[in-house]
Amino acid sequence: MPSNTIINNINYASSLVEQLEFHKTAIAAQQATATNKMPPKNKKKNDEEELGLMKAARFGRVKNTLSMGFVGLPNVGKSSMTNLLAGAMHAEAANYPFCTIDPNVVQCIVPDKNFKYLADCWKPPSVVPAVLKVTDIAGLIRGASEGAGLGNAFLSHIAAVDGIYHLVRAFDSDEVIHVDDSVDPIRDLETIQGELCAKDKDTLTKVLEREKEKTRKEKGLSRSADNFKLPEAFTSAHEKCTALVDANTPIQTGDFTSAEVDCIRDFGCITTKPQIYVVNLSQKNFIRKGSKWLPKIKAWVESHGGGQILPVSCEFEQRLFDLKDDKEAKEAFLKQCTEEAVAAGLKGPQAEVRSMIPRMIRAGRQALCLQSFYTAGPKEVRAWTMMKGTLAPQAAGVIHTDFERGFIKAEVCAFEDFKALHQGEASMAKIKEAGKYRQEGKQYVMQDGDIVVFMHNTTTAKKK
């Protein structure tokens, strides 16, 4: 690997670590009082919760093509929700525990009002939005970590994704069978988390044996030798991880030093992945924003390391999706839902009923520490996906590897500056006049919403 690429990668990782340290206060800000009502829509609080998810990014792959996966028991709504996220009925949603045997992968368009604004401004023939890859993984059951059901295959599918939508069922229905014959989200959370932690416990046992064997070879000891010390960072990381999974708590919620994080990245544990807890409610409970299970779920999540909880309703989302081609019927349905919310005692913004699909997609991207930069012109407006902390040359490499190799500079404009200054013109002229069109070098950390043009010079190597 060329030395300049190594240096860029080191700077890239350092930038991400700095952001994680900066957002530690956001992680602590996620504590709240349990209640059986969904919290009011508070943008600042939501942003803090999303930033808190960056804690899990320490263990993730440094890539721009990361994916989320739905995990849960059979018949909790994983395939239905995957279909709805994709905006099309891609997965076979059937009332049978193992209807999705192979993981079903869909591409979800990322809702982005800034991107839409640029597309409406330039009106180019080509418009390419950002997407989030989501995998519908077949349902786990108790004993999956030991091979029950189709457990081993499913656990390998979970290991292949980078983040988890942990979907639990909190609705009653005689038409949709439950694998345990009754609805109890807390029991289901314990089952799934227990299986994931059990798999990690087995992984940690193998990791320990592997490290011991490696140390024996390095020290020239016999296979039976056991009176030697393992590296301090490895030992402390392994002990902390073991304590967490023994307590049925995801590893990613723990506090680790940078040396321990480096060790844990090589462990290959499932629970190092960021998790978003998605609660599937009935339409009635979703509209009135209340359920007897919500405070219990919230308490359980907080006692297992904390995390973001998103109450949704597949029933509501499906009905809304079925009306997508009938604007009047869709508006009438949403009006009816709002009236039901008001009748249940909700007021103001709390009474407003809207789809949770956009928020789920955005939350998935936040969990994976992904964001967008834009290229805009008369031929194409496009949103490109990058990780938070990406340096300008690596962002250029998202478009084409030659752009990174021959990077000279980036001409950058923040979206908000463009919106405030362009005066309706599909041009950067007014932004340049205002001095808001910048030239940035190799150490520039790209920001979400940057509109950019990369300058590069790549020459073909001469044949010897």
Image: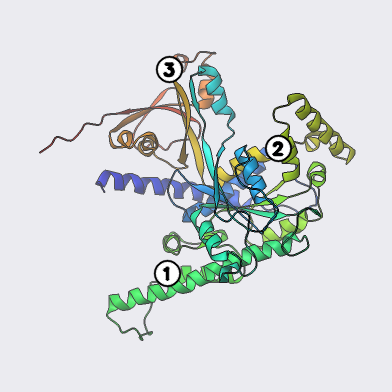
Residue 318: horizontal and vertical position, in percent? Answer: 72, 40
Residue assigned mark 3: 432
- Location of the C terminus by quadrant is top left
Q: Are marks 2 and 3 in contact (CB under 8 Å)?
A: no
Label 2 SS: loop
Residue 219: horizontal and vertical position, in percent? Answer: 28, 78
Which numbered disc flags the more N-terminal residue, 1 or 2? 1
Amino acid residing under circle 3: Lys
Residue at image location 40% in from the left, 49% down from the top: 13
Q: Is residue 136 shown above or below 246? A: above
Residue assigned mark 2: 355
Is residue 239 shown to the viewer in this render? no
Q: Nearer the viewer, mark 2 or mark 3?
A: 2
Which numbered disc flags the more N-terminal residue, 3 or 1? 1
The Cα atoms of the two marked residues, 3 and 1, are separated by 52 Å
Residue 173: horizontal and vertical position, in percent? Answer: 80, 53
The Cα atoms of the two marked residues, 2 and 3, are separated by 39 Å
Label 1 SS: helix
Which numbered disc flags the more N-terminal residue, 2 or 3? 2
How busy is the neighbourhood of tag 2: few (under 14 within 10 Å), some, or many (20 plus)? some
Residue at image location 81% in from the left, 34% down from the top: 348
Mark linked to residue 234: 1
Label 3 SS: helix
Q: Nearer the viewer, mark 1 or mark 2?
A: 2
Q: Is residue 160 shown above or below 123? A: below
